[in-house]
Amino acid sequence: MTRSTSPRAWQSPPQTHPARRSPSRRRTPTTKAPSTSARTGAGRAARTYSPATAARQLRVPGAQLHHCGLRQEVEPLTAEEGRRLLAAARSNRLWAAYELAVRIGLRRGEVPGLRWSDVDLYEGVVTVRQALQRVGGELLIVAPKTQRSARRVALPSECVTALRAQRAQQIADGKAAGDAWKGHGHGLVFTTKNGTPIEPRNLNRSFEALCARAEVRRVRFHDLRHTCASLLHEQGADARMIMEVLGHSSIRVTMDIYTFVRLDSQRSAFDRVGDALRGDGSRPDDDDGTAGVPVTV
């Protein structure tokens, strides 16, 4: 009889049942010794950490903060810092980009994606229709972030002046580059000396160097958008207007994320509350008790 050479189907091993232990051999329960972690628990509680180690232990990822209903605090540039930044930017090739980011809050991708056909320098209006982003290693023109991100915004006079200078600079770049000019066709406002689009990451590097030259706090380029919202808020602009300028998807985004009350604004408000509570406008007395009346302590 020949043995079959066909592969065998996989069979599960036979199930075995553990032999029942007789009552006479049943183990008596014993008390477990405390684990090492339990024995050293008191010592761990008393352990001290360096400030750097403690900071690492207490760091909470932004996603968890958002899940808990919290958000990471962002401190926008102050008006004084904004003035210094824009003053230093006047000698920069991207001066108009910083004016647009600070004054009307354009996003990092919206700045290099801006076209001259979307800018009306005579009427002083800009229309945001697209953005420039690197996707999968390729630089692409993409649609705005949300439906409301496509928007028309009035241009402050300072932005119009900077954009006129940008156009003159671009024309000079084209003449200097000659046949090597690559800016034909796309009509972008911001280009390199050869007419190629501005890499968003290079915009970040240029901004970091500008912060150092202007001697302002090092923040992200996106924080210029926060700065725009905060300055508009401090100057009395309502949330609806800020939402339309920045192109937020809803007014809740504006209220929850982009409007900030700085500590100095809080102190100023508290001082006004104190003046109202005193009623006579006099400064508070240094004595902890009622003025002129002895107090038993």
Image (cartoon, rainbow, N blue to C red):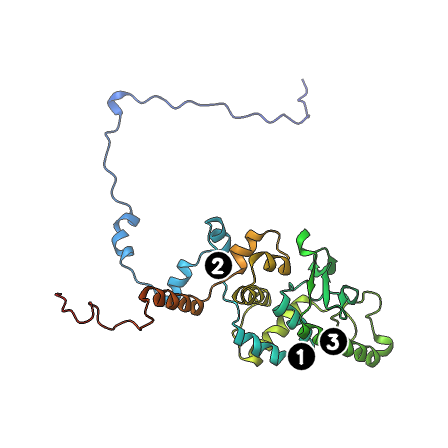
**In front: label 3 or label 2:** 3
Asked if residue 113 shows in the view, the reply is no
In the image, what residue type sits under mark 3? Gln
Work out which quarter of the rendered image holds the C terminus and state it. Answer: bottom left
Quarter of the rendering occupied by the N terminus = top right
Residue at 24% of width from left, 42% of height from top? Answer: 33
> Which residue position holds label 1?
92
Q: Are marks 3 and 2 in contact (CB under 8 Å)?
A: no
The x and y percentages for residue 28 are 23, 29
Q: Position of residue 50 (x, y in %)?
A: 35, 66
Classify mark 3: helix, strand or loop.
helix
Q: Label 3: which residue?
A: 166
Question: Percent from the top left, x then y, of residue 5?
Answer: 68, 26
Q: Residue at x 54, y 26 (%)?
A: 12
Mark 3 or 2 closer to N-term? 2
- Looking at this view, name the residue that lies furthest to the top: 1
